[in-house]
Image (tube, rainbow, N blue to C red):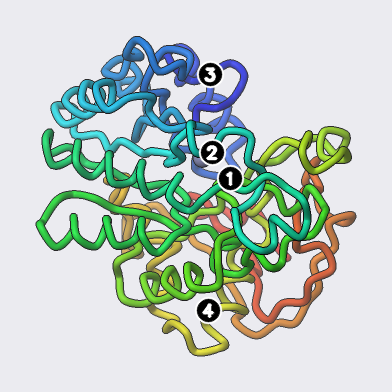
Amino acid sequence: MPNTQPINDNASVTRGIVERAAAAGAVRVWPIGAASVGSKGEALAEIAAMKDAGIVAVSDDGKPVATARLMRQVMDYCRALDLPVIDHCEDPSLFAGGVMREGPRSIRLGLKGIPAQSESICVGRDVEVAMLTGARLHIAHMSTRASLEYVRAAKKQGLPVTCEVTPHHFTLIDEDVRYDSHYKMNPPLASREDRAALIEGLADGSVDAIATDHAPHHPSSKDVEFDRAPFGITGFETALALGLSELLHPGKISLKRLVELFTTGPARVLGIERKIAADEPADLTIFSPDVAWTFRAADSPSKSRNTPFDGRSFRGAPMATVVAGRIVYRR
Ligand SMILES: [Zn+2]
């Protein structure tokens, strides 16, 4: 995602990311470019030049594309370039000042709530603009039943609209939120009913991908009052284990479907061709569906510790990853 410093809103930043990732050689990095300059929601970024440099989508992630008018311009441009537009859907006027999902739990904790409609209003707008332009639209980290209904309706009409769900949104709900900034992310953890709808969507194909929304923060920035802490949690280290533990083993989805959600699903969203075959790049994750283990954030090789899953036990884990035929990680 382009919400880095510097923001990936021009071809030289894109090239820098692609070159550094290639030099590190441990993982494929497909950068997403900003939709607007500085993700400020005013002027269009250099989308065509960034595409030549290697972006696979555009987004003003961290916030939605600012207005329907700008979204129309971005989509017209991206349709011509055959790039998907990925939107972070939260209506800023409803979201304003909120730190968790609005409901009985936010009242009990005395925290300012964000209504579910903050997300679905924005999803509805985006689907309408996608209808107007015919562009590819992808909803990032979708968390509510109402948003899913918009995506389902768009798919039914044959629009190229896709969506993803994060492991934390299919695992945790607003009732799990404690006065601990490791439960603070946007969109916030949703209701029990929303989680049930998301899991149904993951199983029936309405949801196209599982994506982590991995958001590392320095420990000192999260070690403050809930209201003041930044939004976001890490996700890479627990993503597959949560999929196996929370979806596969309880029988909510099949192994085939789970694998699709981590592999061909996201590849299709981004228009990346991948298959396991002779003369194809060998990018593989080898996993055990059954190995029992406990995640200890303190033992993590990550520089960040902002996870609500510290100390959680799992069934299933990645055992090795292979990039371009080379083993880059071994458990
Ligand atoms: Zn986002």
Q: Amino acid at mark 2?
A: Phe
Out of 302 and 90, give the one closest to the viewer. 90
Q: Residues within 10 Å of mark 1 (few under 14, many from 20)?
A: many
Question: Given contact means CB atoms under 8 Å apart, are the residues at marks 1 and 2 in contact?
Answer: yes
145 vs 208, nearest the viewer: 145
Q: CA distance from mark 2 to mark 4?
A: 30 Å
Establish whether ligand 1 lies closer than 8 Å to the Cβ of label 1: yes
Q: Nearer the viewer, residue 203 or 227?
A: 227
Q: Which residue is mark 2?
A: 95
**Residue 158 found in image quarter:** bottom left
Which residue corresponds to mark 3? 7
Q: Earlier in the sequence, mark 1 or mark 2?
A: 2
The tag on residue 186 is 1
Q: Is residue 170 left or right of residue 153?
A: right
The mark nearer the N terminus, 4 or 3, is 3
Screen quadrant of the C terminus: bottom right
Residue displayed at 72% across by 35% down: 230
Q: Are marks 2 and 4 in contact (CB under 8 Å)?
A: no
